[in-house]
Amino acid sequence: MVDPHKITAIVLAGGRGTRMGGVDKGLQPFHGKALAQHSLERLQPQVGALLLNANRNAAAYAALCGPFAAPVLPDVLPDYPGPLAGFLTGLAHCQTPYLLTVPCDTPLFPLDLAARLLAALKAAQASIAMVSAPESDAHNDAKGDAWRGAGPAGPLRPQPVFCLLRAELLASLRAFTEGGGRKIDTWTAQHPTVLVPFDAPGDDPRAFSNANTLAELQALQNP
């Protein structure tokens, strides 16, 4: 039985949104709510504490996060160095044994994400559990059958921004980033990592489809 109070989750909304024209991705509307709010709502019943990593529009995010008692935290590293900065920010503020990382642009991730990652991490006696999911054709053909969940799910692909980390990895990640490291997979390769498949019957093949552009966001909203 998974105790959600042992997990803190951080929503990663600290990027520049370059491929979305420079807008703040986490604040873009999806079915009438900001993308980041969807992530917070899906995470709230799964974990014991919530954090949000953002580098812009602090007041807007604070208003969004208020009902979730989720503090808004900027990167602990300068100059938008990427998702690992969000990982490091989360680990630096994590008060639980585990940290779950989730990007703000993937609003359909599973409601049992935390439980499945923790179960796999414990079973493998790993330090990191990383999602592995079918690669969607959404970005190539927003109107294709694969976007609607029809047809074969396709090969599994690691989703490195969806990770469950043991909190004691803070020192390792701090040393890696202080040495100039920025790639998630280069750092995770230093630790026992289990890939957790999310392709079971009933799993939504779009669960890990992310919106990098406004067109992709629109397509995800209107399957």
Image (spheres, rainbow, N blue to C red):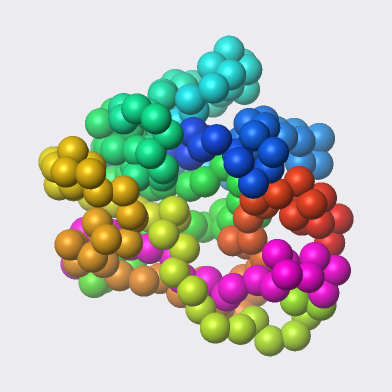
Q: Which residue corresponds to the image point at 61% horizontal and 83% vertical from the top-left?
A: 154
Magenta-tinted stretch:
125-144
Q: Quadrant of residue 77?
A: top left
Q: Is residue 134 above or below residue 171?
A: below
Q: Check if residue 129 falls in the magenta segment.
A: yes
Left or right, residue 52 beside residue 20: left
Q: Check if residue 158 falls in the magenta segment.
A: no
Q: Quadrant of residue 60?
A: top right
Q: Which residue corresponds to the image point at 59% horizontal and 56% vertical from the top-left?
A: 109
Q: Percent x, y for residue 92?
A: 25, 31
Q: Is residue 70 above or below residue 109?
A: above
Query: How many marks overall?
Result: 0
Left or right, residue 108 beside residue 2: right
Quadrant (top left, top right, bottom left, bottom right) of the C terminus: bottom right
Who is closer to the viewer here, 79 or 191?
Answer: 79
Left or right, residue 7 beside residue 217: left
Q: Percent x, y for residue 204?
A: 66, 68
Quadrant (top left, top right, bottom left, bottom right) of the N terminus: bottom left
Q: Residue furthest bottom?
A: 152
Please tell me whether the stretch drawn in magenta is mainly helix, strand or loop.
loop
Left or right, residue 139 beside residue 118: right
Q: Percent x, y for residue 138?
A: 72, 67
Q: Percent x, y for residue 142?
A: 80, 65
